[in-house]
Image: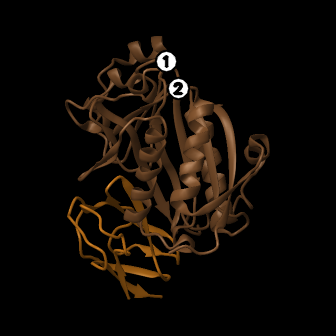
Amino acid sequence: MRGENRAVLHGDVGRMAYGPALELQRRLHALRRHNVIPDVLLTLEHEPVITLGRGARAEHVLASSQELQRLGVEVFPSERGGDVTYHGPGQLVMYPILDLKALGLDVHGYVENLEEVMIRTARAFGVPAYRKPGFPGAWTSQGKIGAVGIHVKGWVTLHGLAFNVDLTLNGFALIVPCGLQGVEAVALADLAGRPISILEATEQALRAFAEVFEVELVPVAGEVIRQWSSPSPSGSRCTSTPAS
Amino acid sequence: MEIVVPELGEVVEARLLRWLKGAGDEVEVGEAVAEVEADKAVFVIESPAAGTLEELVVSEGQAVHSGQLLARLGLS
């Protein structure tokens, strides 16, 4: 079904630590829920961080806290689905803040779309990638190239996908990725056999995103998006905080 | 009133992750009462109305499917 393409604002916010990026997502989520803003897609890289999804088990972090500290890797609990994962420089992160109902998507359809974005991005660089039934994400014959982990509240999404482009630090060695023993995390540049910049990968991923979601991406300066704040301290959290 | 699992689509496996409220708790309309995990998505279940959670029908960790009854809500 091809209708009129909806507009989704796209902002690249560059390199961000996990905490501030989470805060930003929460603000955007509140704004989207209150219909103050249209759908938004954030692209970014994270400073090195290991995040523990709702299904995470602590023993899936293999490195000691001293080692993580030495490497400058933060550890964060996260409200997204899934187990343990790593984010860091050289990995493209996409956080779509989308109203799934308005897009006519259910949860499964949304996860499939995110997978498809990564599969098409990999293919754009000549790297065959595919789905593995029962194991969400984007896979190659060499291992897992991209992960999904999302949170849906009021049918508006947070979190999203992480696609390994050209990792400077292979932080996946510090964990059991996704809690799956024996799974190798691989990066696009290694499989393509040439260096690939985040910029180059982002460009392809944005094209894939627009195609898969059948939307038109409208660029907004990252600094503008970073400055958006919640509608009001009480209003922004009215759905999660009981009146006291 | 019933609180049910929303339409998740063709998910491979969904389960009730955790209750955020307990039986007997009063909830506001739109207040988060539970989290369901499906594929790699955490979906927050919000109360469709204000009232009291009379009975939690599903326990944490249990497999669930779209449309399944999760809890009964007594309207206030």
> Which lettered chain is shown in brown?
A
Asked whether the viewer can see residue A178, the reply is yes
Q: Position of residue A198 (x, y in %)?
A: 58, 30
Quadrant assignment, res B58: bottom left
In the rendered image, the residue lying farthest to the front is: A126
Query: SS class of the residue under badge 1?
Result: loop
**Three-letter amino acid code at disc 1?**
Thr
Quadrant assignment, res A210: bottom right
Q: Position of residue A154 (x, y in %)?
A: 52, 68
Q: Residue at x 55, y 44 (%)?
A: A205
Q: Position of residue B75 (x, y in %)?
A: 44, 88
* Residue on which the image places disc 1: A168
Few, some or many residues within 10 Å of mark 2 (<14, 14–19, 20+):
many
User: Left or right of A96: which side holds A226?
Assistant: right
What's the distance in space between the residues labelled 1 and 2, CA to CA?
6 Å
* A34 or A236, nearer to the observer: A34
Q: Residue at x 40, y 39 (%)?
A: A146
User: Left or right of B49: which side holds A142?
Assistant: left
**Three-letter amino acid code at disc 2?**
Gly
Tag 1–tag 2 contact (CB < 8 Å): yes
> Which lettered chain is shown in orange?
B
* A141 or B37, nearer to the observer: A141
| Disc on the earlier residue, 1 or 2 | 2
Q: Residue at x 45, y 47 (%)?
A: A120
Q: For the C terminus of chain A, give its image quadrant.
A: bottom right
Q: Position of residue A39 (x, y in %)?
A: 64, 61
* B23 or A19, nearer to the observer: A19
Few, some or many residues within 10 Å of mark 1 (<14, 14–19, 20+):
few
- Circle 2 chain: A
**A163 lies above or below B2:** above
* Residue on which the image places disc 2: A90
**A229 lies above or below A146:** below
